[in-house]
Amino acid sequence: MKYKKHIVPILITAVTLFVDLYSKHLAVMHLSNFKKIDFFNGFIRFDLTYNRGGVFGILQGYKNLFLVVSLIVLGLMVAYYLYESAMPDLFRYSMALIIGGAAGNIIDRLIPGRVGVVDFISVGIDNVFRWYTFNIADAAIVMGAVMLGILIYREEKNKGKEAA
């Protein structure tokens, strides 16, 4: 079957999207009543925030701009995935995580009445360093990007060995 190699990436995309949207739903439903919920002495914190901008909260208030940019990037990612048909499994799995995460944040921007993307996971130590609040989609995108980086590194390393 020609399309068999796409089954796992489709499942990864679907699970990523479902877990992201469901976790955001739970965050909105349950964290609205609390200021924050701490785990491990506050190292991990659930704290509901809305990102009205882009990555790391840049350009707050430009929700529609980031929606358009995200849709274009998602389309390019899907096209690239389909174009690179001979890539290894690591490529397909990383792209699936990125596509699932991007789709989750796009859907979040499209929910009527929602002021921004729901972020609720915060990691760090207060008064020392706390990372930007994020969500499952953001984590999936980062994991996919790291996997792509590993793939590119391995490919370049193999090219160097072949040239030598």
Image (spheres, grey):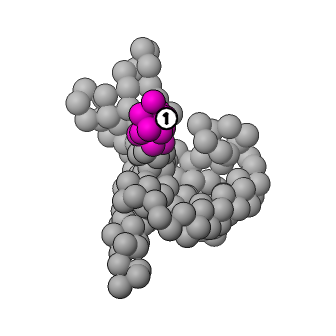
Whether residue 31 is visible: yes
Q: Is residue 59 above or below residue 15?
A: above
Q: Is residue 156 left or right of residue 44?
A: right
Quadrant in the picture for residue 20: bottom left
Residue 158 lies, in percent from the top left, at 42, 39
Most extreme residue toward the bottom is 1
**Amino acid at pointer 1:** Ala
**Magenta-colored segment: predominant secondary structure:** helix
Q: Is residue 139 above or below residue 162?
A: below
Q: Nearer the viewer, residue 159 or 61?
A: 159
> Residue at 71% of width from left, 42% of height from top?
60
> Residue at 49% of width from left, 35% of height from top?
163
Looking at the rendered structure, the secondary structure element under dot 1 is: helix
Residue 161 lies, in percent from the top left, at 41, 34
Q: Nearer the viewer, residue 47 or 69?
A: 69
Residue 40 lies, in percent from the top left, at 23, 30
Residue 104 lies, in percent from the top left, at 51, 62
> Residue at 41% of width from left, 82% of height from top?
2
- What are the residue bounds of the magenta stretch? 152-164
> Residue at 39% of width from left, 67% of height from top?
9
Whether residue 120 is visible: no
Where does the C terminus fall, quadrant-wise?
top left
Quadrant in the picture for residue 112: bottom right
**Residue ID for mark 1:** 163
